[in-house]
């Protein structure tokens, strides 16, 4: 029997760190991202854990239902103890005043950050209907979903939407014994390539850039490994309620 974790955005950052943290003999990790991560495959072999990879660009939202069908065709529910879907993949661009942003980039942003999680959530619920083992959907959110930043209109909006998606679908699922559990987790400010992009943005496009430069200079960022360990800890402990929106900085303060 395996605990199955399906994670989007495993090529780097929090997604990669989460996959590594969860790759244990009792778990099976299924990764989804545009690019393969050979280090994860090697790590899985070292840990004697099961890892599978599905290449997919989440901007192509029209194919997500078919993707999830392919993923679950590889899952034997008779051999599964629990199944968790982690909507982790995300993008930050465009970083600039909204009127200066390219409409195509805004569209791609919302497709990756909000529409893809919505479609994956719906498909997950449909494809696991009637399964009696624990089923969980985790949305990796951000404090930006609650705090507005000049230059981050798309990012703040998409993360606020992700939190509300969590709450709404949690209400739909209810508190029954076999309901799909939903959880939104803001991991804090994590030292990923997204942070590198933020620090390289001109102040005219992102007025708070110096704050993030200072966070890096003072070693105030959380490592992807620490963030992944805390997220996994929440999931493994079951320390959350249906529809919770959690900020790890407050939980681990």
Image (spheres, grey):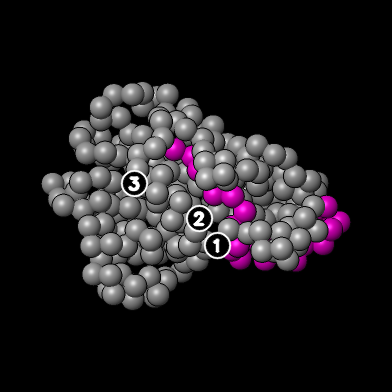
Q: Does the residue at mark 2 contact the one at mark 1 (Cβ under 8 Å)? A: yes
- Does dot 1 land on a helix, a strand or a loop? loop
**For this rendering, which residue is in front, 215 or 148?**
215
Q: CA distance from mark 2 to mark 3?
A: 14 Å
Residue 163: where, in percent of width, then height?
A: 54, 36
Q: Is residue 186 magenta?
A: yes
Looking at the rendering, in which quadrant would you find the C terminus? Answer: top right
**Mark sitting earlier along the chain (1/3):** 1
Residue 181: where, in percent of width, then height?
A: 36, 34
Magenta span of residues? 182-207
Left or right: residue 194 compared with residue 136:
right
Residue, x 23% and y 69% (percent of image)? 48
**Residue 236: mark in rendering:** 3
**For this rendering, which residue is in front, 21 or 220?**
220
Is residue 33 in view from this perspective? no
Residue 155: where, in percent of width, then height?
A: 65, 47
Q: Does the residue at mark 2 contact the one at mark 3 (Cβ under 8 Å)? A: no
**Mark sitting earlier along the chain (2/3):** 2
Label 2 sits on residue: 227
Residue, x 77% and y 49% (percent of image)? 151
Q: In which image quadrant can residue 159 be found? A: top right
Label 1 sits on residue: 223
How busy is the neighbourhood of tag 2: few (under 14 within 10 Å), some, or many (20 plus)?
many
């Amino acid at each position: 029997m395996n605990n199955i974790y399906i994670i989007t955005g495993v090529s780097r950052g929090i997604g990669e760190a989460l996959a590594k943290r969860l790759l244990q003999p009792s778990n099976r990790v299924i990764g989804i991202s545009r690019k393969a991560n050979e280090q994860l495959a090697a790590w899985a072999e070292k840990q004697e854990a099961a890892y599978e990879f599905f290449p997919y660009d989440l901007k192509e939202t029209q194919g997500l239902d078919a993707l999830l069908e392919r993923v679950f065709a590889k899952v034997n529910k008779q051999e599964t103890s629990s199944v968790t879907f982690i909507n982790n993949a995300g993008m930050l661009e465009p970083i600039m005043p909204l009127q200066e942003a390219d409409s195509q980039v805004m569209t791609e942003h919302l497709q990756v950050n909000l529409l893809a999680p919505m479609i994956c959530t719906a498909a997950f619920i449909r494809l696991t209907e009637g399964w009696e083992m624990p089923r969980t959907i985790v949305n990796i959110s951000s404090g930006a979903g609650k705090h507005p930043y000049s230059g981050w209109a798309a990012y703040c909006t998409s993360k606020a939407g992700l939190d509300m998606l969590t709450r709404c679908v949690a209400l739909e699922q209810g508190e029954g014994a076999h309901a799909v559990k939903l959880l939104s987790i803001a991991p804090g400010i994590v030292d990923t390539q997204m942070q590198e992009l933020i620090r390289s943005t001109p102040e005219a496009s992102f007025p708070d850039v110096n704050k993030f430069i200072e966070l890096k200079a003072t070693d105030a960022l959380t490592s992807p490994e620490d963030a992944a360990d805390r997220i996994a800890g929440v999931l493994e402990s079951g320390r959350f309620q249906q529809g919770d929106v959690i900020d790890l900085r407050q939980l681990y303060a």
